[in-house]
Image (spheres, grey):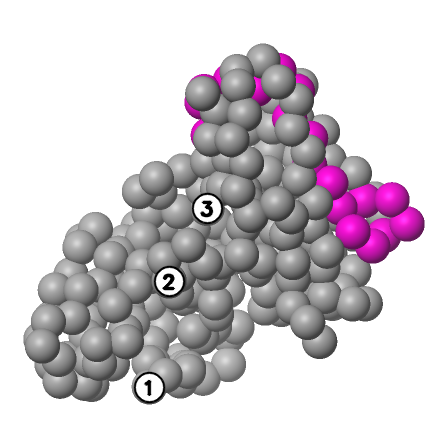
Amino acid sequence: AQSVTQLGSHVSVSEGALVLLRCNYSSSVPPYLFWYVQYPNQGLQLLLKYTSAATLVKGINGFEAEFKKSETSFHLTKPSAHMSDAAEYFCAVSDRNTDKLIFGTGTRLQVFP
Amino acid sequence: DTGVSQDPRHKITKRGQNVTFRCDPISEHNRLYWYRQTLGQGPEFLTYFQNEAQLEKSRLLSDRFSAERPKGSFSTLEIQRTEQGDSAMYLCASSPGQGVETQYFGPGTRLLVL
């Protein structure tokens, strides 16, 4: 069965600092991986996705993630945090047959001035 | 393209009552998904439709839950005899239905069962 694990339910950074949100996956087949962001009382918005093309994926709002098969990881990074990045971030793996998403438990990012 | 819409946005009900939620997907999106999200957790898959056919149901979807997508357009999710444990955010998403695609999420319906 496919699954994702997000290490760290809360991450706090200063504005301008590096953002690193961790995600490890488990999959018996090459996975499709996603990062979504959720702002308070809103639905989920796609940041980026990996579908077996380039291992370094660039997304919206300056975020990027690198697929590392040897580490079964898909960590999300942003070089310089902005106050508006404060939100909940979810890593997800997609079931290849149905495209249903299997989400991690999320990481809440706080950005301090 | 107006995005995925859900109605209502909030619902408060008493235990034992029935509730129905509606989801309008992005026009011409063939796949429609329902997820449930409880506090502090990621969304969990409930069910999905390919056009009007319901192709998979999670074990989370008890007999009290039923979903429909008549004519392959909007979808409804009904919960009968609600329980306090049903309190959650119910999210709907849609995708074109071909290959690995982005699922576009609606704003969700937040249900509180008293």
Tag 1: amino acid? Gly
First in sequence: mark 2 or mark 1? Answer: 2
Q: Is residue B7 visible?
A: yes
Q: Is residue B28 above or below residue B44?
A: below
Q: Mark 1 sits on what residue?
A: A62
Residue named by callout 2: A39
Q: Is residue B32 left or right of residue B88?
A: right
Q: Identity of the amino acid at label 3?
A: Pro
The amino acid type of the residue labelled 2 equals Tyr
In the picture of the structure, the residue carrying the numbered disc 3 is B43
How far is the residue under mark 2 from the one under mark 1?
17 Å
Q: Is label 1 in a helix, a strand or a loop? A: helix
Residue B19 location in percent, x, y? 65, 28
In percent of width and height, residue B83 lies at: 51, 17
Q: At 73% from the left edge and 56% from the top edge, which residue is drawn?
A: B24
Question: Mark 1 packing: few (<14 Cα in 10 Å), some, or many (20+)?
Answer: few
State how far apart marks 3 and 2 are (Cα): 14 Å
Quarter-of-image position of residue A109:
bottom left
What segment carries the magenta color? B69-87
Q: Kindly identify which chain the residue marked by label 1 belongs to.
A: A
Q: In this view of the protein, which residue sits in the foreground, A74 or B33?
A: B33
Q: Residues within 10 Å of mark 2 (few under 14, many from 20)?
A: some
